[in-house]
Image: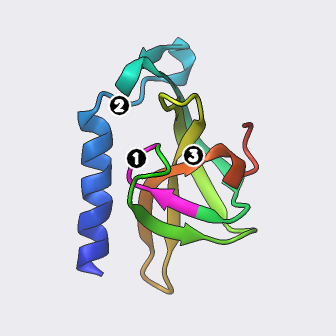
């Protein structure tokens, strides 16, 4: 469990280190992400998984943090387009029986019910 937590912290640190820190949604701000892609901010918003991996960054080649299954609830905070133009959501997934644990990472928009 400690390794998973360390991976989640590393993923968040990597996201923040690449300039993907969220800005208030009310400000309507967007910022350039890696490769000049757009990043938009929002509060944590519920969405439903269609099944698919949560990754360390917003590219299909990035390592998988965890696998989601159809029907599971996720919460997304902000989204970004990668250099290929694909939309990804930065999500939080909570799991645990009695001791909740949060996983964070990026999921492709086609794998959730949020707008793609």
Name which residue lies at 69% across and 60% down. 49
* Above or below for 40 versus 68: above
Q: Which mark is residue 57?
A: 1
Judged from this view, the residue extending furthest toward the bottom is 97
User: Reading the chain from its start, which is encountered first: label 1 or label 2?
Assistant: 2
The CA span between labels 2 and 3 is 14 Å
Q: Between residue 51 and residue 21, name the one nearer to us.
A: 51
Check disc 3 and report its element: helix, strand or loop.
strand
The residue wearing badge 3 is: 76
Which comes before the other along the chain, label 3 or label 1? Answer: 1
Rendered residue at 48%/81% (across/down):
96
Residue 35 locus on image (x, y percent): 38, 23
Name which residue lies at 30% across and 81% down: 1
Q: On the picture, is 92 further left or further right than 75? A: left
Residue 88 drawn at (x, y percent) = 56, 40
Which tag is nearer the camera, tag 1 or tag 2?
1
Q: Which mark is residue 67?
A: none
Under circle 2, the secondary element is: loop
Residue tagged by mark 2?
21
């Amino acid at each position: 469990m400690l390794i998973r937590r360390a991976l989640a912290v590393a993923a968040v640190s990597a996201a923040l280190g690449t300039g993907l820190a969220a800005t208030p949604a009310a400000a309507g701000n967007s910022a350039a992400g890696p490769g000049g892609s757009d990043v938009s901010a929002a509060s944590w918003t519920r969405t439903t998984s269609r099944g698919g991996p949560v990754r360390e960054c917003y590219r299909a080649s990035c390592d998988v943090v965890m696998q989601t299954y159809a029907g599971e609830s996720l919460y997304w905070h902000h989204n970004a387009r990668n250099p290929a133009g694909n939309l990804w959501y930065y999500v939080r997934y909570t799991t645990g029986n009695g001791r909740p644990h949060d996983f964070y990472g990026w999921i492709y928009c086609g794998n959730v019910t949020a707008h793609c």
